[in-house]
């Protein structure tokens, strides 16, 4: 089955252009540019937030004012002018949608174009979708069916209204407001995002999915996602991102927090295809994202899978804190950079509990004039007896003007634990290409096959639909970059 | 089928020629053996015909079915029906064998105006071919040549040959490194694929494989030139006497 | 003699320098380098944990103690270092006491024509030319206050010069002794090694300290390899447990040259080593191997950089660590492959053995690749001895404790066994055995 889809994907790798680069004509309700306490109060007031939420934001804002934009990542870019960003932007016609019929047809059309039909009857079997358009969640599907199972899946704004006790308990518990510059900024100004709560013992009956779309050229997107799996709960969550083409840079500074209690299992998959800028490096999204999960209880498991193909600059380290004994953390990543893209991405695995296990599989592909870095931290604490980490970071270079970098930080203070890290850098072999050409495949097909083979260990972690999309994406992105 | 006229070639970017004027004609239905000592240019000849990018043709022609193929990409040549069984089959990690073969077979079928196989049709098609080389179905799901033993790699080459149904097959030292059982399997496979419609060029160092596959003609390549051509009895002669007695001849021919 | 003064952290090196008696070697190249180093004295920023490269290593043991400049005159005698003498180098032993060449203690016999081993001050014109060309150029100090500090205060330079097409069969042993018997001292050891075209030599640079007082030693060595030169450079750091030893081991590789470097870290309370190899010509090979033994409260930190600046080169780095007690090891190994440096084959491996509950290991192997047609790999492991191997030995009647010692010993030998000086291998084998507690017999020595 998967063989067929891979083959199809190779063949449909037709258009070289960024095909998600259209804009939707919308009327916006916008705030003035720049950030101050008044703006934050206004965001909070508009959203009718409780006092504690406002305090959370204000506290984060004050932290942010004292912080500096990090310059340790291996990326170069013109730092955004934070006074020139619109911190809140939402399509007009609101405030609340009871059903999809009330959503602006333009937005629905946009998601159709993206290949994400929101109408339930057309939906992929068993995927519930929350769509975030610029900063605001516009539609969540399959809500009823989920509710029957006891699963809460809604926008975070709605969760703050409807389930304040849950949000209050967990928001900022994994990523404190002062964690880093971008997380602090997000905590101050986040406008929306997804919330998911899977109660004790419940296996979420379908895949949950959020599609993010930046549409407004001057607005930043600061979404906030919070996923909680109680004891023995299981959930698989997918995230997809696209944006129109603008010749300016847009900032995307999201925060994702995952909490897995005893025996819970959270799987979080991302296919990130924000607009990367054009072939001269003009425009594109700055993707500065903080993602972290905590395995709070024993035997909890958190698994991150990401396929990063978009954005002008990416700065992202989905991490797991392995606090519960016997808990498991996984990170599977494919990061592809082409033209002038820059990515500095990886993971952190912090082993605190006994017999904790982590696995890191990272595949970096650099083409064009791009720079691709893996940065990771594996830390085994003093009390994490019997813990194990296994990491593999492979890089592939296509062309002589790109760079591949590997920066693993590895530390152990426990003499009953072990860490194994290996990394390789190679190029696509001329012999491999010739061999496949001798079997009648043209060069593009040959390269596509080799790349998919290189990434296979990661793709197999993705849900099928995402695996197909990821394969297609890589092929499209790499077209014309070899030879 | 194949006509090579005064072919000269060298490694891209180097001065010294490896092929120094090869003339050879293989007709439909014929099996030719190319023999010669190490470094004589046998493998280079096979690779040049298939279009390996590491080699540069400095002069001469290679006509396949009357058409000069030297300007074609390797995949175009393959789709025309030219197959190279590699001396050292390349490993392609992560790409499953069945996927490669399906893509390859469909590329050829498309070229020939035949309908491409869907995965189910392909499954039936390939299982039939597997029997030919006595390979297990499990081979299909493994990554191409990755972790295969030497014998398995060579059998895999023959499986691909069987699947792609080429008109001309170039077998580059397919016999090297095979134990007697594997050699028997590979040879029998090739014999079953022989027909009046297709041709083979066997590149080999030893006469051993020719006990199983009877060639119509044997050519001895020495120092980039064909030093001697003859019938299958020539191979036996070489087995007895080695190549030394021909080295002088090659020199004379070269001077001529 | 000056009083020991407690200095501020930020200007620590500058203040030490200003309190030092001004040295003068009379060697033009050295004095020029010194003058350059001193002009930047205000820029010698003392590393703090905020420096990315000093995050894991605290210099508190240094700046919280006071030291005085080690005296040039010293009554060190041969018996103070007989135990580390190398039989093979009986005719080529250079002894530097507190950074200064000691003619009385050194034994340098006849070297092949054109070769030289001794103080820069006495070096012939050909050697002076080499110094003028390369001294202080390889160990760059623009980013490194300690190298600048070393250059500013060094009283002398030990030089080994190997002439064109000459192979020196026996190793040359440079013994650096710091005399801390009377008080807390600081000193600067400096070595300059130059191999002309097609030369071949082995140099062992050794560090020991005398006395019970803490001392601070900066050591800088530079090795220049002309085309096709083969130089093996062994650094044996067996300072006293009170030492703070901060060093740079720099090398510049010419076309087709072969540089094999082995650093053995046994002593010191704090050892910071910064190997830097500039592979600036084609077809060269560099080996940067290391063995680190830490226990007690020792800290050993290796920050290496291997820079492939030209195509068609190979490199090999095996860095092995055994941490016991509350010992701490830091490894930060950078491999750069510059743009257009195609067909590089670079291999780096860091293996760490944690033997005790309180030992700590940090490692950060790094690849920075800007060329596409390369084969680079690195690996890092932190772990324990294999249970399987321990079990195997136990089934052969060996007690578990003995099995641990035997395997640890074997683990360390992988680095030592490549050192081409039998006496040194023997000394190091015993040092490892002592560290691991393994009982070894003569036939167990590599």
Image (cartoon, helix red, strand yellow):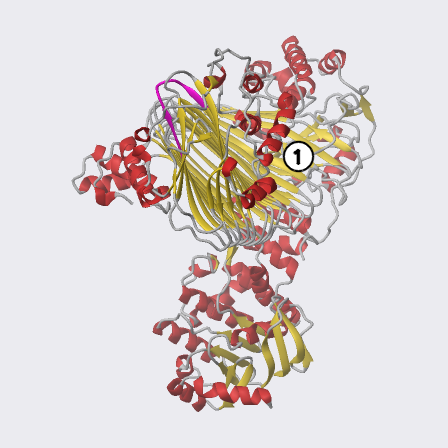
**Left or right: C385 as drawn, with respect to A40:** left
Left or right for A95, reference C52: right
The residue nearer to you, when weighing C99 against C146, is C99
Q: Please state if C127 lies on the left or on the right of C118 as rendered.
A: right
* Main SS class of the magenta portion in the image: strand
Using the rendered view, name the quadrant where residue C61 is placed: top left
Q: Residue at x 43, y 74 (%)?
A: B175
Residue A286, percent from left and from top: 70, 32
Query: Quadrant of residue B132 in the image?
Result: bottom left
Q: Residue at x 48, y 66 (%)?
A: B88
Residue A25 at least partly seen:
yes
Viewer-nearest residue: C220 or A305: C220
- Subunit under mark 1: A
Residue A209: quarter of image: top right
Q: Is residue B196 above or below residue C426?
A: below
Q: Give yes or no for residue B25 being in the magenta stretch.
A: no
Quadrant where the C terminus of chain C sits is top left
Query: Percent position (x, y) of residue C99?
Result: 46, 29
The residue that mark 1 highlights is A75
What's the magenta region?
C206-216
The crowd level at tag 1 (other Cα within 10 Å; few <14, some 14-19, many 20+) is some
Q: Is residue A203 visible?
A: no
Q: Is residue C60 above or below residue C149?
A: above
């Amino acid at each position: 089955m998967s063989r067929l889809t891979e083959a199809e994907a190779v063949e449909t790798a037709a258009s070289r252009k960024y095909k998600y680069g259209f804009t939707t004509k919308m009327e916006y309700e916008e705030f003035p540019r720049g950030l101050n306490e008044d703006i934050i109060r206004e965001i909070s007031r508009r959203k009718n937030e409780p006092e504690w939420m406002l305090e959370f934001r204000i506290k984060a804002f004050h932290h942010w004012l004292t912080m500096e934009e990090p310059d340790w990542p291996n990326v170069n870019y013109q730092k955004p002018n934070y006074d020139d960003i619109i911190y809140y932007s939402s399509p007009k016609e609101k405030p609340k949608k009871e059903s999809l019929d009330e959503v602006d047809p333009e937005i629905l059309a946009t998601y159709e174009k993206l290949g994400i039909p929101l109408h339930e009857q057309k939906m992929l079997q068993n995927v519930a979708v929350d769509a975030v358009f610029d900063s605001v969640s516009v539609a969540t599907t399959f809500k009823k069916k989920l509710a029957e199972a006891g699963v809460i899946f809604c926008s975070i704004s709605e969760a703050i209204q409807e389930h304040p006790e849950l949000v209050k308990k967990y928001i900022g518990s994994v990523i404190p407001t002062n964690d880093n510059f971008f997380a602090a900024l997000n905590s101050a100004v986040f406008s929306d995002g997804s919330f998911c709560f899977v109660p004790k013992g419940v296996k979420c009956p379908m895949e949950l999915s959020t599609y993010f779309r930046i549409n407004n050229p001057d607005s930043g997107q600061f979404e906030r996602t919070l996923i909680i799996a109680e004891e023995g709960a299981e959930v698989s969550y997918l995230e997809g991102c696209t944006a129109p083409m603008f010749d300016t840079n847009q900032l995307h500074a999201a925060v994702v927090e995952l909490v897995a209690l005893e025996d819970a299992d959270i799987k979080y998959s991302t296919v990130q295809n924000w607009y990367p800028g054009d072939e001269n490096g003009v425009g594109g999204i700055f993707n500065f994202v903080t993602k972290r999960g905590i395995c709070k209880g024993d035997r909890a498991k958190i698994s991150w899978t990401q396929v990063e193909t978009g954005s002008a600059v990416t700065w992202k380290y989905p991490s797991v804190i392995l606090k519960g004994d016997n808990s498991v953390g996984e990170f599977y990543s494919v990061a592809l950079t082409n033209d002038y893209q820059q990515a500095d991405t990886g993971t952190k695995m912090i082993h605190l509990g006994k017999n904790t296990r982590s696995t890191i599989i990272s595949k970096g592909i650099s083409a064009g004039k791009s720079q691709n870095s893996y940065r990771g931290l594996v830390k085994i604490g003093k009390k994490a007896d019997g813990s194990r980490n296994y990491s593999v970071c492979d890089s592939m270079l296509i062309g002589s003007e790109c760079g591949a970098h590997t920066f693993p930080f590895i530390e152990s203070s426990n003499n009953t634990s072990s860490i194994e890290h290996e990394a390789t850098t190679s190029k696509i072999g001329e012999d491999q290409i010739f061999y496949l050409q001798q079997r009648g495949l043209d060069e593009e097909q040959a390269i596509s096959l080799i790349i998919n083979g290189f990434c296979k260990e990661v793709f197999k972690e993705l849900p099928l639909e995402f695996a197909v999309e990821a394969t297609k994406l890589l092929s499209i992105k790499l077209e014309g970059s070899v030879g | 089928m194949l006509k090579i006229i005064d072919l000269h070639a060298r490694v891209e970017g180097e001065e010294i020629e490896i092929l120094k004027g090869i003339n050879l004609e293989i007709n439909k239905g014929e099996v030719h053996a190319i023999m010669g000592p190490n470094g004589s240019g046998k493998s280079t000849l096979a690779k040049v015909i298939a279009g390996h990018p590491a080699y540069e043709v400095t002069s001469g022609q290679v006509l396949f079915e009357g058409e000069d193929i030297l300007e074609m990409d390797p995949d175009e040549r393959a789709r025309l029906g030219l197959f190279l069984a590699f001396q050292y089959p390349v490993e392609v990690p992560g790409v499953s064998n069945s996927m490669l073969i399906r893509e390859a077979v469909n590329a050829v079928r498309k070229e020939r105006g035949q309908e491409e196989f869907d995965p189910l049709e392909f499954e039936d098609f390939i299982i039939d071919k597997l029997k030919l080389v006595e390979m297990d179905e499990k081979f299909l799901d493994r990554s191409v040549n990755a972790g295969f033993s030497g014998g398995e790699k060579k059998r895999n080459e023959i499986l691909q040959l069987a699947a792609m149904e080429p008109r001309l097959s170039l077998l580059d030292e397919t016999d090297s490194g095979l134990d007697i059982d594997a050699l028997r399997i590979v040879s029998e496979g090739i014999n079953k694929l022989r027909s009046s419609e297709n041709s083979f060029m066997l590149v080999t160092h030893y006469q051993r494989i020719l006990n199983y596959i009877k060639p119509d003609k044997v050519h001895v390549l020495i120092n980039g030139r064909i030093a001697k051509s003859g019938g299958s009895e020539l191979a036996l002669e070489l087995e007895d006497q080695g190549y030394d007695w021909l080295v002088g001849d090659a020199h004379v021919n070269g001077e001529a | 003699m000056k009083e020991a003064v407690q200095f501020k952290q930020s200007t620590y090196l500058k203040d030490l320098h200003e309190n030092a008696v001004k040295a003068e070697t009379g060697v033009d190249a050295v004095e020029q380098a010194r003058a350059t180093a001193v002009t930047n004295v205000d820029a010698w920023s003392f590393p703090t944990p905020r420096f990315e490269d000093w995050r894991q290593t605290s210099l508190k043991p240094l700046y919280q103690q006071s030291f005085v400049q080690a005296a040039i005159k010293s009554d060190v005698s041969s018996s103070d270092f007989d135990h580390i003498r190398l039989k093979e180098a009986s005719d080529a032993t250079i002894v530097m006491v507190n950074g200064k060449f000691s003619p009385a203690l050194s034994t340098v016999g006849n070297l092949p024509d054109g070769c030289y081993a001794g103080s820069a001050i006495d070096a012939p014109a050909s050697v002076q030319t080499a110094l003028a060309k390369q001294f202080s150029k390889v160990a760059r100090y623009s980013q490194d206050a300690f190298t600048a500090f070393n250059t500013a205060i060094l009283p002398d330079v030990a030089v080994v010069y190997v002439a064109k097409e000459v192979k020196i069969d026996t190793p040359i042993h440079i013994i650096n002794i710091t005399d801390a018997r009377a008080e807390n001292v600081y000193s600067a050891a400096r070595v300059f090694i130059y191999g002309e075209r097609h030369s071949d030599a082995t140099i062992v640079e050794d560090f020991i300290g005398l006395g019970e007082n803490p001392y601070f030693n900066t050591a800088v060595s530079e090795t220049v390899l002309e085309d096709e030169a083969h130089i093996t450079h062994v650094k044996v750091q067996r300072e006293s447990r009170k030492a703070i030893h901060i060093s740079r081991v720099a090398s510049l590789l010419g076309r087709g040259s072969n540089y094999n470097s082995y650093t053995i870290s046994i002593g010191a309370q704090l050892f910071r080593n910064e190997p830097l190899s500039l592979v600036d010509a084609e077809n060269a090979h560099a080996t940067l191997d290391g063995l680190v033994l830490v226990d007690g409260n020792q800290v050993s930190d290796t920050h290496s950089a291997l820079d492939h600046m030209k195509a068609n080169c190979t490199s090999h780095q095996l860095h092995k660590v055994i941490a016991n007690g509350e010992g701490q090891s830091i490894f930060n190994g950078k491999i750069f492959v510059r743009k257009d440096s195609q067909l590089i084959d670079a291999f780096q491996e860091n293996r760490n053995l944690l033997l005790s509950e309180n030992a700590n290991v940090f490692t950060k192997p790094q690849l920075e690749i800007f060329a596409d047609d390369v084969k680079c790999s690195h690996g890092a492991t932190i772990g324990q001895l294999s249970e399987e191997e321990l079990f195997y030995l136990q089934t052969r009647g060996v007690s578990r404790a003995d099995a641990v010692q035997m395997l640890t010993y074997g683990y360390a030998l992988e680095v030592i066994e490549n050192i081409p000086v039998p006496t040194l291998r023997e000394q190091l084998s015993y040092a490892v055995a002592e560290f691991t507690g393994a009982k070894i017999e003569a036939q167990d020595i590599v």
